[in-house]
Amino acid sequence: MAQINKSSEYFNTALYTGNYYTQSITGVNFQPDLVYVKGRNTATRYPTMFDSVRGATKRLTTHSTNAEDTHPTMLTSFDSDGWTTGADDQTNGSSETYVSWNWLAGGTAVSNTDGDMTSSVSANTTSGFSIATYTGDGVNGSTFGHGLGVAPKVVIIKCRSLGTEDWHFWYNNSTRLNLNNANIGSAISPISTSSTLVTTPSSTNDSWNGSGQTYVSYCFAEKKGFSKFGTYTGTGTTDAPFIYTGFKPAYIVIKSSTYGGNWLCFDNKRDSYNENSGNPLNINEANPEGADPAYQIDFLSNGFKLRNANGNINNPGETMVYMCFAETPLVGTNNTPTTAR
């Protein structure tokens, strides 16, 4: 299994200021296949996803059930060191600040016939990330191929063709990415994954397998030294949990699995030092970031530690689910140890 020694070749965060003209967003270090953009200082800039499989200009928003639509001025191209935007307030408002989270998949998609439903897949087996699109067949428990060669731990699915269907995020239960609700639990049967397939729930639903409807899925397999997905239990005290990841984090998403809290994103570019100001962005809302010490998190050489008792990230007895991607592996092949920021 290939080892990742430079995480920024597979995931990177870019900050920029809009100009309302054509602008190249650079410094990503690779040509991204998934670009996730969020305005930082304006309350009307919603979190927006673009990917290379669906194609440039094709927008999905994670704060809503909206269907995919085409916006020719938001993301106009995926480039060798980032991407290009045009004159659009959502991605390039004049003098507004933005963050772009960027992942590398496998470039041009290929047809995958492993499952019941043929998928178009861009997969990076080194970093454990793939993008798959497919058309539903309306059959309970149908499968589609994800292309990773190992079973993914996190699967996200969104119906592209209907504007009424939630985003579904599966780790240990289904949770809706566009809402701040608790997990759905037994109301939706679980998915299952193998080294080749995602098996959709055994109940037919337009959210993941409506006949003739189109879908996109983002699949993440855990990779030592690069990505970690898991849960922890909140303590509700300032003596908060430490979560071991085996690497220095670059990007963390936290959501209470059993409590109605927001999906909170933290990264190493907007807050670059510990005892930070606590600037999470909600990916289920259009709200701007705002400094709040109740959300402070230390990014350490081998994981992260919560510093406060805020209920959204450290509610007593609540199960919190997290996704984390690396800035630096704990020790790479050059044997150079990493340190906390």
Image (cartoon, rainbow, N blue to C red):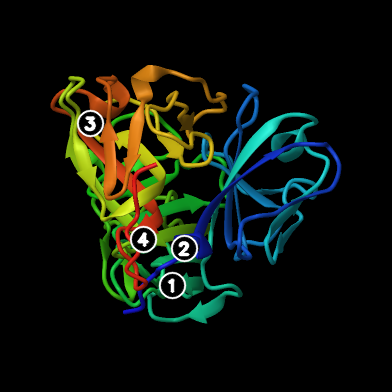
* Closer to the camera in the image, 339 or 184: 339
Please state which amino acid type lies under the numbered disc 4: Phe
Please state which amino acid type lies under the numbered disc 3: Thr
Query: Is the N terminus in the top left, top right, bottom left or bottom right quadrant?
Result: bottom left
User: Is residue 256 in sight in this rendering?
Assistant: yes
Query: Is the C terminus in the top left, top right, bottom left or bottom right quadrant?
Result: top left
- Residue mark closest to the camera, 2 vs 3: 3
Q: How crowded is mark 4: few (under 14 residues within 10 Å), some or many (20 or more)?
A: many
Q: Distance between the residues labelled 4 and 1?
A: 30 Å
As helix, strand or loop, the secondary structure at mark 4 comes to loop
- Residue mark closest to the camera, 2 vs 4: 4
Question: Which of pointers 2 and 1 lies earlier in the amino acid sequence?
Answer: 1
253 relative position to 16: left or right: left
Residue 72, percent from left and from top: 79, 50
Please state which amino acid type lies under the numbered disc 1: Met
Which residue corresponds to mark 3? 258
| Quadrant of the image occupied by residue 109 | bottom right
| Quadrant of the image occupied by residue 46 | top right
Which residue corresponds to mark 4? 226
* Closer to the camera in the image, 91 or 25: 25
Residue 138, percent from left and from top: 41, 61
319 relative position to 5: left or right: left
Which residue corresponds to mark 2? 136
Which residue corresponds to mark 1? 117
Q: Which residue lies furthest to the right in this view?
A: 21
As helix, strand or loop, the secondary structure at mark 3 comes to loop
Residue 309, percent from left and from top: 24, 20
- Residue mark closest to the camera, 3 vs 4: 4
Q: Identify the residue at image location x=28%, y=31%.
A: 182
Mark linked to residue 44: none
Question: Which of pointers 3 and 1 lies earlier in the amino acid sequence?
Answer: 1
Q: How far apart are marks 2 and 4 (CA)?
A: 32 Å
